[in-house]
Amino acid sequence: MSNWVLQASGLVKAFTDGERQVEVLKGLNLQLAKAQSMAIIGSSGSGKSTLLQLLAGLEQPDAGEVLVVGKCLSNLNGNQAAKLRNQHLGFVFQFHHLLAEFSALENVMLPHMMAGNIPAAAKLKALAMLQRVGLENRTSHRPGALSGGERQRVAIARALINEPACLLMDEPTGNLDQHNAQQILALLKQLQVDLGTAFIAVTHDLDLACQLDSQQRLQDGKLVP
């Protein structure tokens, strides 16, 4: 069995800008092993968010392929790809995207219920995840009553509830002050050890990038060390 949880080979992606084609990714390759962390940095418009969309199967490449836990996304239909994402990928964004009308507990429960688990089981798992991220006393609070760092920790608990092989993170500390950013990073590194979760962080935060296992720059459509 392959040790790679996420692989991309020969990814090409272009967009139409007026009358011209702009090639954003030009044969990009990537490999991420279990419990490995990787930072991807690059200038605005270099294609970092596009790359995350392709790795998640939310967009299709013009050429190349993405494998999640050894399964090629291009060979799956929409329902199969959604199930694979739910089981094996977690997502953490700069803007936490929590549902404002739901409590922290209810927000974390949702992916587990979408995976077919009964509410009682989802509640127990969500309580355990919130405890793991240090929010066992904030379970009934809605996002509006939580600090920025607390909301991001809820988002991480939600991303991890199905114990995915890999987290995909887009500027996970972008809206946090330095203290909260360091807390989030420490939490992610501990979860990496405890759960064996791999993660990719697209970031402009060079301090965050330098503390991950590897750093890659997206430049001219490819990843370079």
Image (spheres, grey):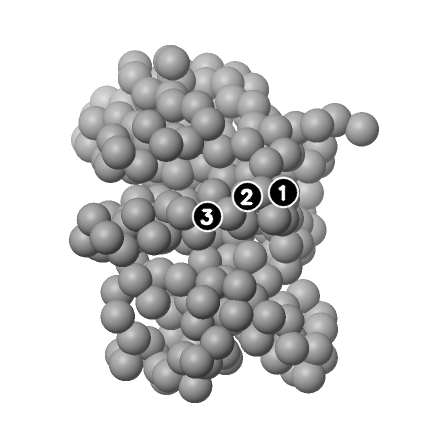
Give the mark count: 3
**Callouts 1 and 3 close, C-beta under 8 Å:** no
Q: Quadrant of the C terminus?
A: top left
Tag 1 secondary structure? loop
Q: Please state which amino acid type lies under the numbered disc 3.
A: Leu
**Callouts 3 and 2 close, C-beta under 8 Å:** yes
Disc 2 crowd rating (10 Å Cα; few below 14, some 14-19, many 20+) is some
| Residue 182 horizontal/vertical position (percent) | 30, 47
Image side of residue 178 versus residue 140, left or right: left
Question: Residue tagged by mark 3?
Answer: 188
Question: Residue tagged by mark 1?
Answer: 196
Q: Is residue 41 visible?
A: yes
Q: Please state which amino acid type lies under the numbered disc 2.
A: Gln
Q: CA distance from mark 1 to mark 3?
A: 11 Å
Image side of residue 159 versus residue 122, left or right: left
x 23%, y 22%: residue:
20
**Callouts 2 and 1 close, C-beta under 8 Å:** yes
Image side of residue 168 versus residue 84, left or right: left
Q: CA distance from mark 3 to mark 2?
A: 6 Å
| Residue 110 horizontal/vertical position (percent) | 55, 72
Q: Please state which amino acid type lies under the numbered disc 1.
A: Gly
| Residue 123 horizontal/vertical position (percent) | 61, 79
Tag 3 secondary structure? helix
x 66%, y 82%: residue:
119
Q: Quadrant of the N terminus?
A: top right
Image side of residue 212 versus residue 33, left or right: left
Tag 2 secondary structure? helix
x 46%, y 15%: residue:
27
Question: Residue tagged by mark 2?
Answer: 192
Disc 1 crowd rating (10 Å Cα; few below 14, some 14-19, many 20+) is some
| Residue 121 horizontal/vertical position (percent) | 70, 77
